Amino acid sequence: AQTVTQSQPEMSVQEAETVTLSCTYDTSESDYYLFWYKQPPSRQMILVIRQEAYKQQNATENRFSVNFQKAAKSFSLKISDSQLGDAAMYFCAYRSAQGGANSKLTFGKGITLSVRP
Amino acid sequence: NAGVTQTPKFRVLKTGQSMTLLCAQDMNHEYMYWYRQDPGMGLRLIHYSVGEGTTAKGEVPDGYNVSRLKKQNFLLGLESAAPSQTSVYFCASSDRQARVMGETQYFGPGTRLLVL
């Protein structure tokens, strides 16, 4: 079974600075997807970024980028030019590339990010 | 498109009462999921469905039942609510075609359930 570990329960960043959120995972599969979801106080789960394991290039979405290290099974999220609206809980998640019964997401426990003005 | 909607948004139950949470999606997705979120635990999968008329157990299925009679709806039932089922419940859906955006799960806004 796959597991996702987010070892830092909380982090804080100064507005306009850069912060990196860590995530590691364990799997025996070679083809899979990794995600970062953001959950603001509204509780809505918002997809931030996703990475396909078969792609070597790190995914980027505006101020958000990942550092995907497949051999190390590491998937960190970098937020550049942090904004007050980035304050939220962030979840790392894993999904097998197989369909059907393997389509479920496995989540880490989440990290609470606060942004200091 | 409304995406994924959940009914109700909030509910208080007494121990032993029953209720049904409704999830609806208008994206014609094959796959649907129910997760629960508890403090310090992340989201954990309760049940899921890979198509109309089919359901399967997830990580924490005990105390819950589900039904997928229509492709667009996925119901989560609590037959006899217990305080341990106090949680926030999320429904999600995704397309079967994993390589074409299908790997992304779209979440509903959540249902907060309090069992006294």
Image (spheres, grey):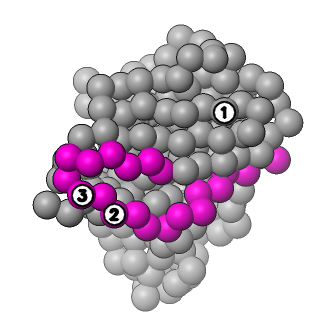
Q: Which of disc 3 and disc 1 is earlier in sequence?
A: 3
Q: Chain of mark 2?
A: A
Q: Is residue A5 magenta?
A: yes
Q: Residues within 10 Å of mark 1 (few under 14, many from 20)?
A: some
Q: Which residue is mark 3?
A: A14
Amino acid carrying label 3: it is Gln
- Marks 1 and 3 sit apart, C-alpha to C-alpha, by 27 Å
Q: Chain of mark 3?
A: A
- Work out which quarter of the rendered image holds the C terminus of chain B and state it: bottom left
Q: Is residue B107 left or right of residue A3?
A: left
- Residue at the spot x=80%, y=40% of the render? A27
Choose between A117 and A90: the one closer to the eye.
A117
- Residue at the spot x=53%, y=71% of the render? B40
- Marks 2 and 3 sit apart, C-alpha to C-alpha, by 7 Å
Q: Is residue A49 left or right of residue A105?
A: left
Say what secondary structure mark 1 lies in.
strand
Is B46 located above or below residue B79 in the figure?
A: above
Q: Which residue is mark 1?
A: A69
Residue B111 — which label?
none
Residue A56 visible in the shown view: yes
Q: Quadrant of residue B49?
A: top right
Q: Is residue A43 left or right of residue A24?
A: left
Q: Is residue B46 magenta?
A: no
Q: Which residue is mark 2?
A: A12
Q: Position of residue A58 (x, y in %)?
A: 53, 23
Choose between A12 and B49: the one closer to the eye.
A12
Say what secondary structure mark 3 lies in.
strand
- Work out which quarter of the rendered image holds the N terminus of chain B and state it: top left
Is A30 located above or below residue A83 in the figure?
A: above
- Marks 2 and 1 sit apart, C-alpha to C-alpha, by 24 Å
